[in-house]
Image (cartoon, rainbow, N blue to C red):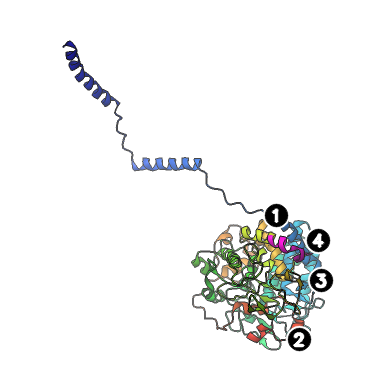
Amino acid sequence: MRLFRFRATIRPCIVLGLLLGLAACKPSEPPQTSIEQRQEQQRQAEAARQVAEPAPAEPTKPELPPLFDDIERRTFQFFWDTTNERNGLTPDRFPSRPFSSIASVGFALTAYPIGIENGWVSRTQAIDRTLTTLKFLRDIPSGPDATGKGAHHGFFYHFLHMETGERYDSWVELSSVDTALLMMGVLFSQSYYDGDDPREVEIRELADALYRDVEWTWLQERGPLVSMGWFPESGVIEHDWRGYNEAMLLYVLALGSPTHAVEPEAWTVWTRTYNDNWGVFQGEEYLAFGPLFGHQYSHVWIDFRGIHDAYMHERGIDYFENSRRAAYAHRAYAIDNPMEWEGYGEDVWGLTASDGPQQTRQEYEGEEREFRHYSARGVGLTDSFDDGTIAPTAALASLPFAPEIVIPATVEMHERYGDYLYSSYGFLDAFNPSFEYDIPLKTGRIVPDRGWVASDYIGIDQGPILAMIANYRDGFVWEVMKRNPYIREGLERAGFTGGWLDADDAPPDAAVDTPSATAAGSDAPEAPGDGMSPATARSLGEAESRASQAQSQTPRDARETGRPPR
């Protein structure tokens, strides 16, 4: 009874004590914070997260294997060894060496400083060779005569005699785009040799004079576009350079000229045909041109990363990214291999203008196929032709755009085909594992069970290999050309902005007399249509040994366009 009363008495006390204890232990409400305090707390928390979780590092640039050192040196030696040391003219091709190509001379002038930087030749040796070249170009006989001349109105004939510098033959045109490739090498020399030595001063003066002499406006017969060239026998070629292809560099040079500049509307009209070539191919959306050289030549000298004209600004990419997509599209095409050519795959790809076995039709995989000798080859939305011929320069010159696919492709082609494709001056021009027909060949040879392989190196294919390896390593050619005010002026008059063009270290305007930059007008006239594809049009801008061909037959390009073959 007493126990019951005790329990009855203690229960209310326990309950009361627990309630009081819980009340004492209950946390107090936090004080209200202001908006500013909450924002400060968020900033502190974000800062703490950034310390705890550092931003991911930039992707590491793939390292070049030793093979590329060897390719670079051998390709340089092509220009140093084969150029005529008496006049500086570089052969179109070697070892057949039929004539000089002025475009090859432009690549050679670019090659010599690469040799200096790598210790392969001395600066004195390169200055000697460069001065010899520029003086000879200055003194080449010029005029409207069909023979005995090598230049006219500042433009040079596409192919010149290796010794005299005169027009090689009656089928050779005065070429606007090949003169442009030459002038890129000339201006590269002007910017690289920047010392006070009298001979370097002379190089700069000679380069300036050669560039100023080019009368770009003379070839604007149907302005504002620039014609492909001129023949003394028939006059200005009726076809103009319109986008998209390698002539982008031509318009940059023509816009930057201090003496014979075209108007900015030329660029506006040049880009008007871009939409015909913009689309999706092999999963890549880009501005297409079938052969890869069209995505490479201008990039040899101009760094298009981060700079945009009006068209690319609207598309949201730059020309560098566009070329990257083109390389990926070519690789994807080789993987798909819709024509079932031998050897094509993820590490064997790349179509461009190159040598080939012969102009012929032969049966392959149960159907008749067309094969060609020297021709533009490529795939895309337009300008497509594929006969199973791969050119190593197509992949190699895409190195800065897509090293992750170019490096393994280069290694694979060397390992799989190098025994007969890789020689004194690096990769021979092209190979076709599918072509094993027992017929007379235009050039090259048949390797039993391996197919056709070229016998020549071609200067305009060697040049991009060498320069683009240098650009991938440290941007060497690009950085030199950024100092050239003519190039900057041409880009700015074309409407390019952004990137290095907006940098504070722009060269002083006082260095040269450039045309006043004006905005490209929206009322530029429409370009006259000629109905010709860019790849066919380039039949006046590629290098080919055509002397015997011109005598024996009328080639395909001449039949289609009424103009001389490439």
- Lower sequence index among marks 4 and 2: 4
Quarter placement of the C terminus? bottom right
The mark closer to the camera, 4 or 2, is 2
- Lower sequence index among marks 1 and 3: 1
Distance between the Cα atoms at labels 1 and 3? 32 Å
Residue 429 painted magenta: no
Q: Is residue 315 visible?
A: yes
List x then y, in percent, for residue 387.
65, 74
Q: Is residue 77 left or right of residue 501?
A: right
Q: Residues within 10 Å of mark 3 (few under 14, many from 20)?
A: some
Count of marks, rendered view: 4
Q: What number is the disc on residue 382?
A: none
Q: Amino acid at mark 4?
A: Thr
Residue 139 position (above or below residue 200): below
Magenta part, dominant SS: helix
The mark closer to the camera, 4 or 3, is 3
> Magenta region: which residues?
412-424
Q: Are marks 4 and 3 in contact (CB under 8 Å)?
A: no
Q: Amino acid at mark 3?
A: Asn
Distance between the Cα atoms at labels 1 and 4? 31 Å
Q: What number is the disc on residue 551?
A: 2
- Lower sequence index among marks 4 and 3: 3
List x then y, in percent, for residue 463.
71, 67
Q: Secondary structure at mark 2?
A: helix
- Lower sequence index among marks 2 and 3: 3
- Lower sequence index among marks 1 and 4: 1
Q: What number is the disc on residue 65?
A: 1
